[in-house]
Image (cartoon, rainbow, N blue to C red):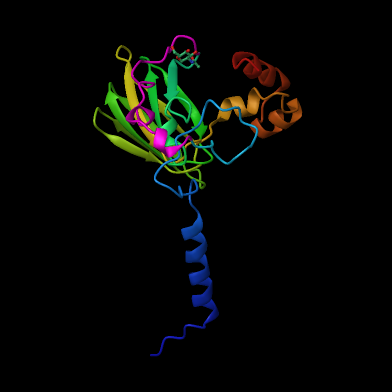
Amino acid sequence: METNCSSPLLQLLFGLALLLGLAKPDPDPLQDFCIADNISPQSLFLNGAPCIDPNQATASHFATSALSKPGNTRTNKFGSNITVTNSVNLPGLNTMGLTIARADIEANGLVPPHSHPRASEVTTCLKGELIVGFMDTSNHLYIQKLQPGDSFVFPKGLIHFLSNPNQRIPALAMSGLNSQNPGVQITSIATFATIPGIPDGVLEKAYQISNQDVAKIRRNLGG
Ligand SMILES: *[C@@H]1O[C@H](CO)[C@@H](O)[C@H](O)[C@H]1NC(C)=O
């Protein structure tokens, strides 16, 4: 049988493969590095931060202690705190398409369902235990228990959560994300605590709840 390279189906498949190959999380750097210039006033807006003179680069531009201390989990009602690297506390990651996040989750605490529009995430449990999960676009839930040393992937853009099922021991996880600015939307906050608020009627119908329920959830979430 002879292969026909001009068949519409093959052309469609090649076209699709080409498009998917071009879908990259962050643009690739055009030089070895572009250490974020956090000092010069920014009058020019770029997709990322401008770079310092490469000849001024030092090892400390590529190092950070931003994740060395636990975040305070008492100041937030979910009992968790996320600390992240960015181009200010780790200027050498500018244009590299990377973020590291530290999640401290107290006993019984939760990193509530949220998504990162610009990044996939791989998380590793370092201390304690975690129940992690994500939902796909068919609303199938993938849920897993993690012990120290275990890792789990949250695909780009999908809603996921991390919870600490232990009643006594805090949990610690470190995550890598493939964007220097992954973005985050916490599902409950993004619906019930936006500024300005989503019209009550929209939430009543979407969640099949009463006006009182809407008011109560808004109050609970500080909306
Ligand atoms: C996370 O911890 C830091 C450092 O303790 C604190 O400044 C910050 O307010 C905490 N964030 C939340 C959301 O609780």
Residue drawn at (43%, 28%), measured in percent from left and top? 85
Location of residue 201 by image quarter: top right
Give the residue furthest to the front. 55
Front in this rendered view, residue 74 or 101 = 101
Relative side of 193 to 147, left or right = right
Relative side of 27 to 173, left or right = right
Q: Position of residue 16 (x, y in %)?
A: 51, 65
Residue drawn at (70%, 28%), measured in percent from left and top? 204
Residue drawn at (49%, 10%), measured in percent from left and top? 75
Relative side of 58 to 213, left or right = left
Q: Position of residue 127 (x, y in %)?
A: 27, 22
Instruction: Please say whether residue 65 is one of the residues in the magenta stretch.
Output: yes
| Magenta-highlighted residues | 52-76
Q: Position of residue 200 (x, y in %)?
A: 74, 25
Front in this rendered view, residue 187 or 15 = 15
Q: Position of residue 103 (x, y in %)?
A: 39, 23
Location of residue 44 by image quarter: top right
- Vertical position of residue 201 compared to residue 74: above or below: below
